[in-house]
Image (spheres, rainbow, N blue to C red):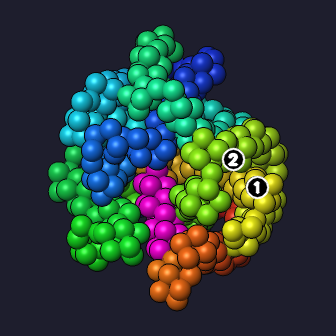
């Protein structure tokens, strides 16, 4: 079946016109910010949690790994969920799950209940970004879409940067439970405001099919890959619970079968994740660049705190404060980049953005035991400046190139790719650091010097990958706006 044949069936719940979309989008942005902020506060808090609960590092890491695995299972489902159910239903379900999970974690007396709370939180978190993307694409005209997607970039950029700082400030005077208690009233407020502002702005397909086998394959595929990639760093240091090749192979095989099944099911509009989004060259190219950009961002987010703490000897609050300006900068320029996208398209933004990001990673490859704090902050600012010029144009170009009935599936693909790319980037950077560190130690270097050598090797390879991405950036173009329900357009 061609893409033109795949327009959605008659909606059981008709879409409503939103006269003033600002409050709806603002609420969704704030809600997404809160759930992503929660995701990134755990890194700094993990040490305190392990001490308080008396658990090992390997067990404590499951508070992060379990969250990521749950996200990996949920996000591919959002294409179906946003096609089958109204935005209002999906929003309240997601925020209610997040609030319940936050309450469970806040009350948790031990590891098991805390892990359960994190998993329930992740069930709601995984839905929020695809929901936000789909809503913006549906109710915002193409001429203003870049500006709105720039606002979304604030969520993607600032929340991960602010998370460690917020966590560090809270832990200065309160216990780790306070992180969840502070999040809970914000989540409840978002639910209350949703009763007023959130409307059903998209068509739903009551005949959308839920294929159980696809869900199982998706969970094994994406979950296996993310778990395997996340375990590579532990394996390099000799602490992986299972050989990392097992979950990676299982994930790769399951993902291959999943793709084959989706290709078969989409012929009858029954795919859990409709892969016809990749018929758009603009979408495919943008997604490829998103993989590289997210890998660089998450790889640097995991490596910089290690470097600042273990090489330069900074405390957690100092680390959080050093990383904060970069995230704030990316968030601050996001609306400007969005406006520029609406006027000039992605090409004049993505190319210099990738050049700056690659240059910043080359700068990070110079970090050692004597590097000044000012230089570190400057390079980190440059990295976030470059990525800030790339994020919004790539997201907008990718999703804006799709016909409206594929928005939910495009949003789900982008969300899934972000998670996998983040895990891959983390795995790449941590593995390179760990291997080089071990080699330096065996050669007689002290711990600080060996760690600095490992950081240098990781950022050096990251800079090479980012430099190669500059070539891909040369081919990014602004796609033509597709007509509702029609096929993939050609690019200008």
Name the side, left or right, on which 64 lies relative to 143: left
Q: Position of residue 270 (x, y in %)?
A: 27, 52
Region rendered in magenta: 415-434
Judged by its main secondary structure, the magenta piece is helix
Q: Is residue 197 above or below residue 396?
A: above
Point out the frontmost of discs 1 and 2: 1
Q: Does the residue at mark 1 contact the one at mark 2 (Cβ under 8 Å)?
A: yes
Tell me how far mark 1 sits from mark 2, CA to CA.
8 Å
Pointer 2 residue = 322
Q: Is residue 465 above or below residue 25?
A: below
Name the side, left or right, on which 300 lies relative to 223: right
Q: Where is residue 8 in the image (x, y as percent from the top left)?
A: 38, 42
Q: Position of residue 331 (x, y in %)?
A: 70, 40
Which image quadrant: the C terminus?
A: bottom right
Q: Where is residue 338 in the image (x, y as percent from the top left)?
A: 74, 42
Q: Residue drawn at (57%, 32%), measured in percent from left and top?
A: 169
Element under label 2?
Answer: helix
Q: Residue drawn at (24%, 30%), measured in percent from left and top?
A: 109
**Quadrant of res 54:** top left
Other-residue count near label 1 (Cα within 10 Å), few / some / many at <14 / 14–19 / ≥20? few
Which image quadrant: the N terminus?
A: bottom left
Other-residue count near label 2 (Cα within 10 Å), few / some / many at <14 / 14–19 / ≥20? many
Q: Residue drawn at (69%, 70%), measured in percent from left and top?
A: 368
Pointer 1 residue = 373
């Amino acid at each position: 079946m061609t893409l033109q044949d795949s327009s959605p069936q008659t909606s059981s719940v008709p879409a409503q016109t939103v006269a003033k979309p600002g409050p709806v989008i603002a609420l969704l942005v704030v809600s997404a910010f809160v759930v992503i902020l929660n995701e990134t506060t755990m890194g700094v808090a993990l040490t305190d949690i392990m001490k308080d609960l008396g658990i090992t590092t390997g067990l404590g890491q499951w508070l992060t790994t379990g969250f990521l695995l749950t996200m990996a299972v949920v996000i591919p489902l959002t294409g179906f969920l946003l096609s089958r159910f109204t935005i209002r239903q999906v929003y309240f379900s997601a925020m209610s799950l997040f609030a319940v999970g936050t309450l469970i974690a806040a009350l948790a007396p031990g590891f098991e209940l805390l892990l359960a709370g994190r998993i329930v939180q992740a069930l709601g978190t995984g839905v929020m970004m695809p929901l936000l993307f789909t809503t913006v694409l549906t109710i915002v005209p193409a001429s203003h879409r870049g500006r709105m997607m720039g606002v979304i970039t604030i969520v993607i950029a600032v929340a991960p940067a602010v998370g460690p700082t917020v966590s560090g400030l809270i832990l200065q005077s309160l216990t780790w439970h306070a992180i969840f208690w502070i999040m809970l009233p914000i989540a409840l407020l978002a639910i209350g405001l949703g009763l007023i502002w959130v409307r059903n702005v998209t068509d739903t397909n009551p005949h959308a099919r839920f294929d159980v086998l696809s869900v199982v394959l998706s969970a094994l595929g994406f979950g296996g890959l993310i778990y395997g990639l996340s375990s590579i760093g532990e394996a390099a240091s000799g602490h992986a619970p299972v050989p990392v090749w097992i979950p990676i192979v299982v994930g790769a095989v399951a993902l291959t079968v999943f793709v084959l099944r989706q290709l078969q099911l989409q012929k009858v509009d029954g795919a859990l994740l409709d892969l016809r989004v990749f018929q758009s060259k603009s979408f495919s190219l943008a997604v490829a660049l998103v993989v590289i950009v997210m890998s660089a961002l998450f790889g640097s987010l995991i490596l910089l705190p290690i470097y600042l703490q273990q090489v330069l000897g900074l405390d957690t609050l100092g680390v959080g404060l050093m990383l904060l300006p970069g995230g704030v900068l990316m968030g601050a320029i996001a609306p400007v980049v969005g406006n520029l996208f609406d006027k000039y398209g992605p090409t004049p933004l993505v190319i210099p953005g990738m050049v700056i990001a690659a240059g910043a990673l080359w700068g990070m490859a110079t970090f050692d035991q004597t590097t000044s704090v000012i230089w570190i902050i400057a390079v980190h600012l440059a990295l976030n400046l470059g990525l800030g010029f790339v994020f919004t144009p790539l997201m907008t170009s990718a999703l804006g190139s799709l016909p409206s009935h594929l928005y939910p599936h495009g949003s789900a693909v982008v969300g899934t790719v972000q998670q996998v790319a983040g895990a891959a980037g983390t795995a790449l950077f941590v593995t390179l650091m760990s291997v080089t560190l071990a080699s330096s130690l065996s050669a007689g270097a002290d711990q600080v010097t060996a760690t600095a050598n490992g950081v240098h090797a990781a950022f050096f390879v990251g800079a090479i990958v980012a430099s190669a991405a500059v070539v891909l950036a040369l081919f990014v173009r602004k796609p033509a706006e597709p007509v509702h329900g029609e096929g993939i357009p050609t690019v200008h």
